[in-house]
Image (spheres, rainbow, N blue to C red):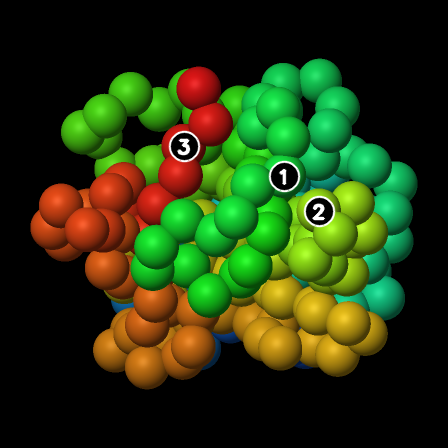
Amino acid sequence: MITNLQTVLRCATVLATLSTVATACGDDASSDDAPDGGCPAVDAGCPAVDAGCPAGCPAPAGDLQTPPQGTPAAIDAWIAAGSYKGAGWKCEAAPHPARSPSPHGVNLICNNTKLSGTAAPADYPFGAASVKELYAADNTTIIGYATGLKLQNGASTGDKWYWYEKLSGSVVYNGKGTAANSDVCSGCHAGAGSDAAHPGRDFVYTQVP
């Protein structure tokens, strides 16, 4: 438990402003999961948003290696800044048609250091992230983006990932996935590595080398 009152108040303030991601660590406020190098339980503190909060979770505000969690405006601003093409990120050389079973159409994928640098067959660690540029049929005009951010260590279920997709000005999905993989993003990504027609592993189809 956090014993420093100033830290409690600072964390509470941040969580109040990021209510859509307040449960990003743990399943709910009653979670008693012990910290394991991934996200600590909610009652162990709060998401690691500054030096006063416990380490271990991807920061909701994002950083140069981490897409934000929260409002479309915050995520769109991070994408517009080009963070996903900065140091430590690896991107495909050019846009290409969707690889089955992707529904995304022409796209280009970038991986951050944690995702591109995790050797198979290991599961991806918390903080592994991917950004997908979505293109019009001309292979030139970007019409949307999709991001995936792993929130916890270990083998995945949908609730260990934060998904965002915006296409042609409309938000398709924004939030943590579901443990049952019933949301549209987790339902697709859960198939990664399941058979020869579904390459990849741990909810990731394409790892950029």
| Residue occupied by mark 2 | 139
What is the quadrant of residue 82 in the picture? top right
Q: The residue under label 1 is which amino acid type?
A: Pro
Work out whether mark 2 precedes mark 3 in sequence or the reverse, and give the earlier one.
2
The answer to whether residue 165 is seen in the rendering is yes
* Among numbered discs 1 and 2, the one appearing first in the sequence: 1
The residue shown at (77%, 72%) is 168
Distance Cα–Cα, label 2 vs label 3: 21 Å
User: Does 209 sit above or below residue 46?
Assistant: above
* Circle 3 Cα neighbour tier, 10 Å, few/some/many (<14 / 14–19 / ≥20): many
80 sits left or right of 175 in the view: right
What's the distance in space between the residues labelled 1 and 2, CA to CA? 6 Å
* Amino acid type, callout 3: Gln
Residue that numbered label 1 is attached to: 95
| 53 displayed left or right of 62 | left
Q: x%, y% of residue 183?
A: 40, 79
Of badges 3 and 1, nearer the viewer stands: 1
- Is label 1 in a helix, a strand or a loop? loop
**Disc marking residue 207:** 3
